[in-house]
Image (cartoon, rainbow, N blue to C red):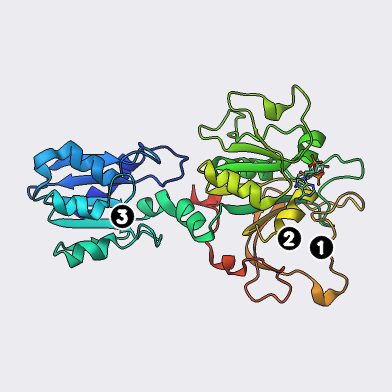
Amino acid sequence: MTSTEHHLDEAVDRALRGPARDRNPRVGCVLVDPAGQVVGAGHHAGAGSPHAEVAALASAGDLASGATAYVTLEPCNHHGRTGPCARALRDAGVVRVVYAVPDPTAQAGGGAAWLRAHGIPVERCAHPAAEALVSDWARARTLGRPHVTWKIASTLDGRVAAADGSSRWITSAEARQDAHRLRSRVDAVVVGTGTALADDPALTARTPDGAAAPVQPVRVVVGLRDLPPGARLGLGPDPALHLRTRDPHEVLAALTARGVHSVLLEGGPTLAGAFWRAGCVDEVLVYLAPALLGAGASAVPDLGVRTIDDCVRLELAEVRPVGPDLRLRLVPGRLAPSTPPGHPAVHALVPPVPSSEED
Ligand SMILES: NC(=O)c1ccc[n+]([C@@H]2O[C@H](COP(=O)([O-])OP(=O)(O)OC[C@H]3O[C@@H](n4cnc5c(N)ncnc54)[C@H](OP(=O)(O)O)[C@@H]3O)[C@@H](O)[C@H]2O)c1
């Protein structure tokens, strides 16, 4: 391992002290003197608090002069609450800056160019752990809303519930465990009141032994109806957020304001259809069970397709077996003629939610 990688690892460790769920990404910074000693370190503790560079400079004091700054994200170049970090680094006498991930935002980007223009050498060093810190945030910034993965558990004939409304369990324990792992990796899990009333789900993320996963998503129920007292979504230390709207854009705006960058949509056909029609689905995960129902709700309501030429087609990005079931990952087609009006088709280029293979 090079010393640059080592110091970026240290910066990542610092960044991990920041909140896992925030409007801003987790960022860490270490300041290293010419002898290789760390003389300052800091992290971003969430929106409204100083940036990691400013925190590191404060901890280093005069020792920052002559140091190299290792930062997980390109230093910002905008006047937020703490002023541009690029300028703060220069003013403190930092002589070199190494960062891992370019800032993708027009608002804050450009710090590296500003530093170079002011005579400070800047290097970019790709670092996977630093990229993982900001990937959900960067993706949401690019989309202008949280990234949405629509999860479906379906039979071979596309049914998501039996004729009596029951849907537990269409897929295997292995598929459900895979879905729990996904829940622990997204910021929010969303269902409609229809699913909440029919299934009384907890929507928590659980480990294979049934214990609560250490990181839980925000649980969200969408719709106008009340849930009954004692509904599992109302239980626990953090009861589900009930958004009394039927508008997917309002849902995503409300979640953005709460620092949510990724959503797992686990609702029934009504809510899923509304998200699809609104162009708010970026990825579809289907757990396909080798089973037939022959009747019952299908994955989406009527999409207005009347002839096969208007069939909505998706691109198959990945298929893999999960226990006795198949998991299909699909993205709205870039060039598919039937891409729904307003659907942001470029999302085919967006990286997927990490799969359990990346454990
Ligand atoms: N196999 C699977 O993957 C899976 C997953 C989830 C659910 N299910 C099954 O699906 C069934 C429930 O389906 P569902 O469609 O009723 O559930 P849903 O989509 O989760 O909830 C539908 C309800 O959400 C509200 N809503 C929110 N946005 C809306 C919009 N844009 N338009 C209309 N209504 C909106 C409405 O209730 P308000 O009147 O309160 O506004 C509506 O009745 C159950 O049988 C469940 O077991 C299966």
Disc on the earlier residue, 3 or 2: 3
Most foreground residue, 332 or 329: 332
Q: Is mark 1 within 8 Å of ligand 1?
A: no
Q: Is residue 265 left or right of residue 157?
A: left
Most foreground residue, 2 or 11: 11
Q: Secondary structure at mark 3?
A: loop
Q: Secondary structure at mark 2?
A: helix
Q: Which mark is residue 267?
A: none
Where is residue 225 shown, x and y percent of the image?
A: 79, 35
Which residue is the site of mark 3? 76
| Location of residue 227 by image quarter | top right
Residue at 72% in and 51% down: 152
Where is residue 179 shown, x and y percent of the image?
A: 64, 44
Which residue is the site of mark 2? 277
Q: Is residue 1 visible?
A: no
Which residue is the site of mark 1? 303
